[in-house]
Amino acid sequence: MKNLLKLVVISSLFLLTSCDLIEEAITGSKLGGTQSPMGQVGVTVTSSSTAINGVSNIQASVTNLSGGVSSFSGTASVSNTSFKNTLSNVPGFSFSGNTVTFTGFKFKNTSEGIESVTGFAPGIIFKYSSSVGDQYEILGSSGKRIVTEKSSSDDFYWGGMLIKVMKVEENVNREGIKKITYYGNHKWGLVSIKFEFDDGTTAQIPIYSSANN
């Protein structure tokens, strides 16, 4: 429960990205390629249906696509009182009973890779053509996202099959979160996110999109 609340707090901080950084992320994007089907309006994104600490049925969808930037909104079922109280104070989240609605996540999703505008710290999350050791700037921060691994064979279990992935690590070191690792695949996009907490525990979340490159 404690780690889940940490995840919520850090995500809410990412959502409060300044307008200047949002504009820079959109107009100064270094991500090329053609528009990915995964960023088209109507595409859905889901995770595990198994309840974790009173949270289940997480579903999101692309509600708008403008200038290559996809806007996501979604819902989840939340029965945990402490979790509900925390989310109730976070901009972009609203409750009706045990159902939470969230908005404000924006990404560029192209044939070349994925870039965060709001939702996670703004900047490229990964470029599929990158090599181990490549780094991506995080706007408004001295931190970097670094490519640490890239599969040469199908060795990552996801969606009932083995796929190749690249791993991109970001040292966060705030609000109890030590590191975030993004797992990407050139066909399926962002397939998993792993959070490492200061107390040594981890939480890894699979990501499934209804579309692919």
Image (cartoon, rainbow, N blue to C red):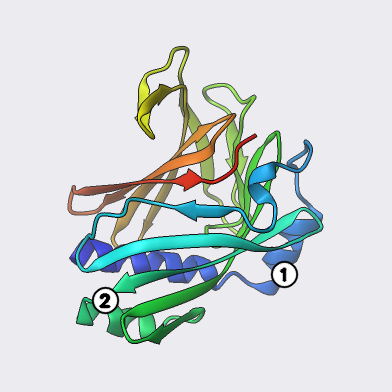
Q: Nearer the viewer, residue 160 or 205?
A: 160
Q: Which residue in the rendered view is the most extreme toward the top? A: 152
Q: Is residue 32 visible?
A: yes
Q: Nearer the viewer, residue 58 or 83?
A: 58
SS for dot 2: helix
How many C-alpha atoms fall within 10 Å of the one at disc 1: few (<14), some, or many (≥20)? few
Name which residue lies at 70% across and 52% down: 40
Q: Looking at the image, is mark 2 or mark 1 earlier in the sequence? A: 1
Above or below residue 54? Residue 193 is above
The picture places residue 123, in percent across and down from the top left corner, at 63, 50
Task: State left or right for residue 168 relative to residue 98.
Answer: right
Name which residue lies at 58% across and 28% down: 134
Task: State left or right for residue 22 relative to residue 136.
Answer: right
Residue type for callout 1: Asp
The picture places residue 109, in percent across and down from the top left corner, at 67, 46
Q: Closer to the camera: disc 2 or disc 1?
A: 2
Residue type for callout 2: Phe
Task: State left or right for residue 26 relative to residue 144.
Answer: right
Circles 2 and 1, Cβ within 8 Å, touching? The answer is: no
Q: Which residue is mark 1?
A: 20
The picture places residue 114, in percent across and down from the top left corner, at 62, 43
- Report, in whole angstroms, how far the alpha carbon at label 2 lies from the one at label 1: 31 Å
Q: Which residue is mark 2?
A: 83
Q: Give the tally of numbered discs.
A: 2
Q: Is residue 89 visible?
A: no
The picture places residue 60, in percent across and down from the top left corner, at 50, 61
